[in-house]
Image: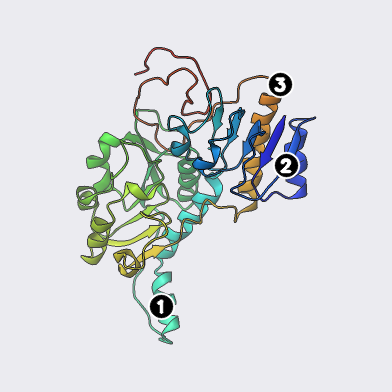
Amino acid sequence: MDVLVQLPLSEEQRERLEAAAPGARFEYVKPRTVTEAADAIVGNVPTEMLAGASGLRLLQLNSAGYEQYAAPGVLPDGCALCCATGAYGQAVSEHLFAMVLSLVKRLPAYQDRQRAHDWCDLGPVTTLRGARVLVLGAGDIGTHLAGLFAAMGSSVCGVRSREAAPHHPFDDMGTLSDLPRLLPQAGVVCPVLPSTPQTAGIAEQAFFDAMRDGAYFANAGRGDLVDQRALVEALASGHLSGAALDVCTPEPLPAESPLWDAPNLLLTPHVSGQFHLVVTLDNIVGIAAENLAQLAAGGPQKPRERLGARPAARPAPEDGARTACGRSRPRGPRRG
């Protein structure tokens, strides 16, 4: 079995990966390199480079998102597509929480004053203790994020696409259809949802209008969840006290985008889910090792759900198509 790895792994991480498939030939290559002989690829590669990989049996992504790889014709029939859901909870949640905490304490504004050599007291700040926090998406990232807010004394309500009982550390759980009722109650709203037909554009003008005056908005899900013009208007009007974005549309953000100059907006260039935190790459290696071991043993790869809210119901895939969890399966009845 030939395994192509396109991740910047340490020697220890390589040993861990290779131990999962004894006897396999591992090749560590630079990104954007694909060989036709590969049985398995670990890492995200441009979809156009997969056309010649006719013998590919496993594509293990290093991202939680997988939509572009699940499109018809991208992968050969029978190839399992596995994402890295579960690898990013700590990294993304810590990043987004730090952004929110810095906003409620006005730290970005104080840094602006520092650069202007202006010793200035900007006045009252707020606290997360006792705050009502709404986390849109109750998967791995959402659960980690809820734990951080709960540790600060916040009351956290999760939001899923389907009804479910709240699990620790959430105090309550609602659905996307509950947003008109939940948004006015929250002082902080944090989407960590995937991009689906159900979630794309969910944070539009009516969404921001429903948020209470002085609330904070922070997105680390997907950029297309947000109507960016509506967000800029909500900030410019003073309706929202601040916003934090680690994702936007498009990326990289064009120099002429109004987001750059929006008041009280803290913006980072989609870095929360990179490999800047060592544990993230360790987690990806663990997921890849598990799936390579299954492939080497001739068994199915372990299914892994997408982060955040579940996608809307959709038709079952055709023969040999990849499911959302990354496994191939024969045609079956439609699932509601």
- Cα separation, mark 1 vs mark 2, equals 47 Å
Q: Residue at position x 36%, y 68% from top? A: 255
- In the picture of the structure, the residue carrying the numbered disc 1 is 112
What amino acid type should be assigned to the residue bearing mark 1? Asp
| Relative vertical location of residue 270 with respect to residue 312 in this rendering, above or below | below
Give residue 244's position: percent from left, percent from top: 38, 59
Secondary structure under the numbered disc 2 in the rendered image: strand
Secondary structure under the numbered disc 1 in the rendered image: helix
- Cα separation, mark 1 vs mark 3, equals 57 Å
Give residue 263's position: percent from left, percent from top: 30, 69
- In the picture of the structure, the residue carrying the numbered disc 2 is 27
Q: Residue at position x 49%, y 14% from top? A: 330
Q: Quadrant of residue 86?
A: top right
The quarter in which the C terminus is drawn is top left
Q: Quadrant of residue 213?
A: bottom left
Q: Earlier in the sequence, mark 1 or mark 3?
A: 1
Give residue 2's position: percent from left, percent from top: 71, 33
Near mark 1 (Cα within 10 A), the count class, few <14, some 14-19 or many ≥20, is few
* Residue 254 located left or right of residue 185: right
| Relative vertical location of residue 177 with respect to residue 121 in this rendering, above or below | above
- Cα separation, mark 3 vs mark 2, equals 20 Å
What amino acid type should be assigned to the residue bearing mark 3? Ala
* Residue 197 located left or right of residue 322: left
- In the picture of the structure, the residue carrying the numbered disc 3 is 297
